[in-house]
């Protein structure tokens, strides 16, 4: 049962839904249809394409005293996107409705679970790299590539994947992600022989393709299904599913596949148990996705989402969206800084076993537990950061603080790794994970805010593509440094790049476009339409509930 629409977004007068393609104009601007002036103390938005320029003074901060009857609401007009659109009166028509569906929790849970299994399959080889190195008779670099193939596959496939998400929808993308993840798991079941490394690589390649249809979905699911007061928490929870999979990947493989290379039959049975168990869970989740994962709720959960959903499909241009994103300087800075942070996390996760075994011999199980500690702490960080963003909307400040603390955590981890007290590594790994992994949903949500109304899937996909590129480069470079000079030099290499990312994050200009649309406060730079969308000169009238315009 959908919840009442009164709890979400600004109130809208009957007959005038807020739709993509409409632009707010000043309350004091004249009405072309003869309705007279709108009586409001301050313009809420500027009209674009040369229409109604009286909003300039309001945009620059001019303000007049507010009459008592105007304390609770302010009138504004919208320019319809369709040429020649009618302008019905403000009375007697159905109001636009926003509501929350209870199904949103089911959709979020299903996504978290199959994302978990995909992340588990990413890390299941590298955390016991020495075991698989001996079983298949290949080098450590070959085993590292079983993780890096996830990063390599993402880069060329992200553009068709985000195009599919934007044009064919959320459900089909989810089915592809879950289905390919299931298929890859079953292929691996046929690789449990010493000479079949290429089969396990094939299965891992299928799982890596599945990942392309998974990593870009958290912000889209949060925006499509969740209201403004819970969207950041929902995004953090969706990312948490992937992090939990990494945690399980650190914990279970050392337990399920102990280092028994002197007993080949036992080792073969252990690997088979892990592969078949993964396949069974993946199959169940694929069936669950096909049955219960829906495209979108009956009603949009927010005014920002209502604006996007009401836009005609022919207005959308994927190429134009990509160009707009790369012209957005704050987004480009975030793209690079996010890639550095997440790429460093991927590198540390992939090479953690090698770093731990350098200083602590025969500690494969503890290496997995340290990885588990790192990710569990990060899951807590993700949820806390999501809750904090929903409460404060301080995206820039929170992102920068978490980045700085991640940098400090990496320095502490680097210089305490070789103290011969493994308990210290557990503590420093937890601190590093809390901030480094907690940063991931912050990047997604900050990107959606500064790029609205561009597609969440496209911005998230580009962030993940940058993360994969940096992840490959960092893993190769840090792996070489660890082999030649030891873990400390490899970690100092990551510290340097995280310092660069901190500087880039500090340079990002915070422009919370989606949040401003949801509370009814906009500026001249905010458009709830694609950049070149047509507008009409005939106005419609809506009523926006009064909201604070204090800067965030």
Image: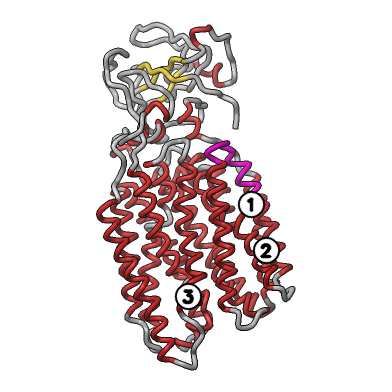
Indicate the secondary structure of the residue bearing disc 1: helix
Which residue in the structure is indicated by mark 2? 428
Q: Which span is picked out in magenta? A: 389-404
Percent coordinates x, y for residue 420 in the rendering: 72, 76
Which of the 4 image quarters holds residue 529? Answer: top left
Which residue in the structure is indicated by mark 1? 403
Identify the residue at horizontal 35%, vertical 54% (top origin): 110
Q: Are marks 3 and 1 in contact (CB under 8 Å)?
A: no
Front label number (2 vs 1): 2
Relative to 187, 421 lies left or right: right
Using a 10 Å C-alpha cutoff, classify the residue at mark 1 as few (fewer than 14 neighbours), some (14 to 19) or many (20 or more).
many
In the rendered view, tell whether residue 528 sits above or below residue 223: above
Which of the 4 image quarters holds residue 500? Answer: bottom right
Give the prevailing secondary structure in the magenta stretch: helix
Depth check: 519 or 333 in front?
519
Q: CA distance from mark 3 to mark 1?
A: 31 Å
**Magenta stretch encompasses residue 488:** no
Indicate the secondary structure of the residue bearing disc 3: helix
Quadrant showing the C terminus: top right
């Amino acid at each position: 049962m959908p919840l009442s629409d009164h709890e979400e977004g600004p109130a809208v007068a009957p007959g005038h839904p807020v739709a993509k393609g409409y632009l707010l104009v000043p309350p004091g601007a004249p009405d072309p249809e003869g309705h007279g002036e709108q009586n409001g103390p301050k313009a809420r938005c500027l009209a674009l394409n040369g229409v109604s320029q009286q909003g300039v003074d309001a945009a620059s901060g001019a303000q007049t005293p507010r009459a008592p009857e105007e304390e609770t609401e302010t009138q504004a007009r919208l320019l319809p996107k369709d040429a020649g659109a009618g302008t019905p009166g403000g009375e007697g028509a159905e109001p636009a409705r926003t509501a929350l569906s209870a199904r949103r929790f089911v959709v979020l849970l299903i996504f978290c679970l199959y994302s978990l299994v995909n992340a588990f399959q990413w890390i299941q080889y590298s955390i016991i790299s020495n075991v698989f190195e001996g079983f298949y008779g290949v080098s450590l670099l070959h085993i590292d590539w079983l993780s890096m193939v996830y990063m390599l596959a993402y880069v060329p496939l992200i553009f068709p994947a985000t195009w599919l998400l934007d044009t064919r929808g959320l459900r089909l993308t989810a089915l592809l992600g879950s289905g390919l993840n299931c298929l890859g798991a079953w292929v691996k079941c046929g690789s449990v022989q010493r000479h079949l490394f290429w089969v396990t690589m094939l299965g891992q390649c299928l799982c890596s393709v599945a990942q392309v249809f998974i990593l870009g979905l958290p912000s889209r699911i949060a925006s499509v299904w969740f209201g403004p007061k819970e969207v950041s928490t929902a995004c953090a929870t969706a990312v948490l599913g992937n992090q939990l999979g990494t945690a399980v990947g650190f914990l279970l493989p050392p337990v399920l596949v102990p280092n028994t290379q002197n007993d080949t039959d036992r080792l073969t049975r252990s690997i088979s148990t892990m592969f078949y168990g993964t396949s069974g869970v993946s199959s169940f989740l694929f069936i669950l996705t096909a049955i219960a994962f829906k495209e979108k709720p009956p009603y949009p959960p927010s005014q920002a989402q209502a604006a996007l959903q009401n836009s005609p499909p022919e207005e959308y241009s994927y190429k134009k969206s990509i160009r707009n994103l790369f012209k957005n300087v704050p987004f480009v800075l975030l793209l690079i800084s996010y890639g550095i942070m997440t790429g460093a996390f991927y590198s540390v996760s992939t090479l953690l076993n090698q770093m731990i075994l350098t200083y602590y011999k025969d500690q494969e199980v503890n290496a997995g537990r340290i990885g588990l500690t790192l990710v569990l702490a990060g899951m807590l960080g993700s949820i806390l950061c999501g809750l904090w963003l929903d409460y404060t909307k301080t995206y820039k400040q929170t992102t920068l603080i978490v980045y700085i603390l991640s940098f400090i955590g990496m320095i502490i981890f680097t210089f305490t790794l070789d103290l011969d007290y493994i308990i210290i590594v557990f503590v420093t790994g937890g601190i590093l994970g809390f901030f480094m992994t907690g940063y991931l949903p912050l990047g997604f949500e900050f990107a959606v805010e500064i790029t609205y109304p561009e597609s969440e899937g496209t911005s998230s996909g580009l962030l993940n593509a940058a993360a994969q590129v940096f992840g490959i480069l960092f893993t190769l470079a840090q792996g070489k440094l660890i082999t030649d000079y030891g873990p400390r030099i490899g970690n100092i290499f990551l510290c340097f790049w995280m310092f660069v990312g901190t500087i880039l994050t500090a340079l990002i200009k915070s422009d919370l476009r989606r949040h401003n649309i949801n509370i009814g406060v906009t500026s001249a730079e905010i458009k709830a339409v694609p950049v070149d969308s047509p507008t009409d000169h005939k106005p419609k009238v809506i009523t926006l509930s009064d909201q604070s315009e204090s800067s965030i």
